[in-house]
């Protein structure tokens, strides 16, 4: 994602057309989610309270104590979270649910790759 978890200031905004809640925007950096998300895209997200809100198949921005900020698909497997890239050259891996410090579900994408 190109963000340091320690120095990231997160501000919310409202987009009534996608729900009556606060939203957050993050720039995508890298190719691990290609072809779904490309380097330079912006993801518009809704903040979640905890890992129990993970829906299989959805895309998330995940703040992890070890890996920092990443954009991935997530699957909850007991006390583990399976972290999956769309780009097959990046293998899936698991982290503990406790290592997740912030979690955002991607709701919309603004693409820079037309």
Image (spheres, grey):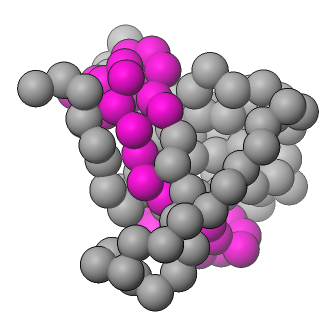
Residue 56 coordinates in the image, percent (x, y): 42, 62
**Image side of residue 87 versus residue 54, left or right:** left
Is 52 contained in the magenta span?
yes
What residue is shown at x 57% (from left), y 73% (from top)?
A: 22
Query: For residue 17, what is the image quadrant?
Result: bottom left
Camera sees residue 28 = yes
What residue is shown at x 62% (from left), y 62% (from top)?
A: 12
Q: Which residues are magenta?
A: 27-56
Residue 110 coordinates in the image, percent (x, y): 28, 43
Camera sees residue 84 = no
Residue 62 coordinates in the image, percent (x, y): 64, 46
Query: For residue 104, what is the image quadrant?
Result: bottom right
Up/down of 43 relative to 92, above or below = below
Viewer-proximal residue among 20 and 107: 20
**Image side of residue 2 versus residue 113, left or right:** right
Is 96 contained in the magenta span?
no
Up/down of 9 relative to 16, above or below = above
């Amino acid at each position: 994602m190109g963000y340091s978890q320690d120095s990231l200031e997160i501000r919310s905004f409202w987009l009534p057309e996608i729900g009556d809640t606060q939203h957050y925007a993050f720039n995508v950096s890298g190719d691990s989610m290609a072809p779904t998300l490309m380097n330079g895209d912006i993801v518009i997200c809704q903040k979640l309270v905890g890992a129990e809100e993970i829906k299989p198949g959805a895309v998330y921005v995940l703040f992890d104590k070890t890996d920092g900020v990443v954009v991935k698909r997530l699957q909850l497997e007991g006390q583990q979270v399976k972290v999956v890239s769309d780009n097959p050259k990046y293998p899936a891996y698991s982290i503990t649910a406790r290592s997740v410090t912030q979690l955002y579900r991607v709701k919309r994408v603004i693409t820079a790759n037309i």
